[in-house]
Image: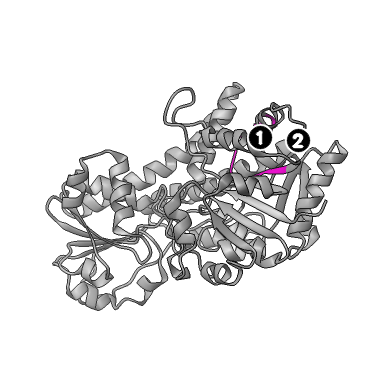
Amino acid sequence: MKIKNICCIGAGYVGGPTMAVIAQKCPKVKVTVVDINEQRIQLWNDPDVNNIPVYEPGLSEIVEEARGRNLFFSTDVEKAIDEADMIFISVNTPTKTYGIGKGMAADLKWIELCARQIAEVSKSDKIVIEKSTLPVRTAAALKDILDSTGNGVKFQILSNPEFLAEGTAVEDLRNPDRVLIGGDIDSEEGREAMDALVNIYASWVPKEKILTTNVWSSELSKLTANAFLAQRVSSINAISELCEKTGADVNEVAKAVGMDSRVGPKFLKASVGFGGSCFQKDILNLVYIARSFNLQEVADYWEQVIIMNDHQKRRFAANMVRTMYNTVADKKIAILGWAFKKDTNDTRESAAIYVADYLLNEQAEILVYDPKVTAEQIYSDLDYLGSRSNDANRQAVTVVNDPLQACKGAHAIAVLTEWDEFRQLDWQEVYDNMLKPAFLFDGRRLLRPDTKREIGFEFYAIGN
């Protein structure tokens, strides 16, 4: 099956970068990314590629190379669907905030709407690919919807979950650990559809790294991978609290454990807690699925990963308050970093949001600096929590464009994203311009530096 036209529904953090790399590596295939968000599409089409809505190192260069050649961004969803041989569904699947499964189950509203639109528009056979993270057996629901039209169009449903780490997404796409493709391996049509997608990736990915499974295994593998990674973060964060009580150094413990080849060193950096769009919602989804099958012990086990992560964020803020003489009311606190990790402008579930919220509830005055996150996004994140009025957030939080400006006159600094530029700051200058006694907080240690002590701290990694 020769693929000439690819459509991706959803121009977000997954759809945009993934399609840009496919367009770069497969120059003879037309790739169209569609979204109903007109502003987002306008930014993807901005003549200045530095204004594209997703920040990833190296992404703007790829977009500049492929855009207008075989990479296109459009709001004409129906036209792109009609022309496509292969359709990726890459829309948001947030945790439900209503009804059955509220707070745990994935909200599949947008997935179903995509399926219905594909079924309504399609006049020729299509390969439809789940790119969004979905509950196991969602493909069966998609198949039912797509086959319900009765117009003779045939659809093959594949699962192709993304395993991108934001901040390194371009490199992850160019040189993936593996590409996972799930489909109907028991039918000739299913195997042909899987081969068509394999051939797309094989343009640059060695075939031994392309795994094919049945569709259910593929869907569940994505949830499981994120659950295992998040579990490691919560595990080392739990040990970090024990280290603080016993005098052990969590960095030394992590190094000793990570040198065991059976464990490995990755995701063993203690931190304020993991963030991002995937870890929490995927674990909650896993918990919901386990409970739906009455697997209570399985559900309780994975839910503890979330409980530990929430505890770490609360504990960090509480340590700040306790260290600053049990009050931060009317004190200026600089927050360096708002994105959930470095090299991305994604703030979803960022630890910084929750730490700031706890401090605002203690009537602190917050100054925020992040090199890639806009003031509009920062206020939107705080407003979304609903802890106080929108006007109150704007009165208590000031967003600045320079880290030194954020720190000047501050009682304390909390480094909440490990941006490389923070390593380059003149920390003695920062300290000299703070109110004394001055406090510096990172993800593990609480430092009260004085003029006789070298200024500095360890950085940490957050999220997937």
Q: Compared with residue 398, is residue 188 higher up or lower down, i.e. above or below?
A: above
Please name the residue that numbered disc 1 is placed on. Answer: 119
User: Which residue shows up at 70% across the image and 54% down it?
Assistant: 5
Q: Which residues are magenta?
A: 127-140
- Residue 434, image x, y percentages: 17, 69
Q: Which of pointers 1 and 2 lies earlier in the amino acid sequence?
A: 1
Tally of numbered discs: 2
Helix, strand or loop at label 2? It is loop
Helix, strand or loop at label 1? It is helix
Q: Answer yes or no: do the residues labelled 1 and 2 have beta carbons within 8 Å?
A: yes
Is residue 266 among what the camera can see?
A: no
In front of the other: 160 or 104? 160
Q: Which mark is residue 288?
A: none
Please name the residue that numbered disc 2 is placed on. Answer: 153
- Residue 355, image x, y percentages: 30, 49
In front of the other: 284 or 263? 284
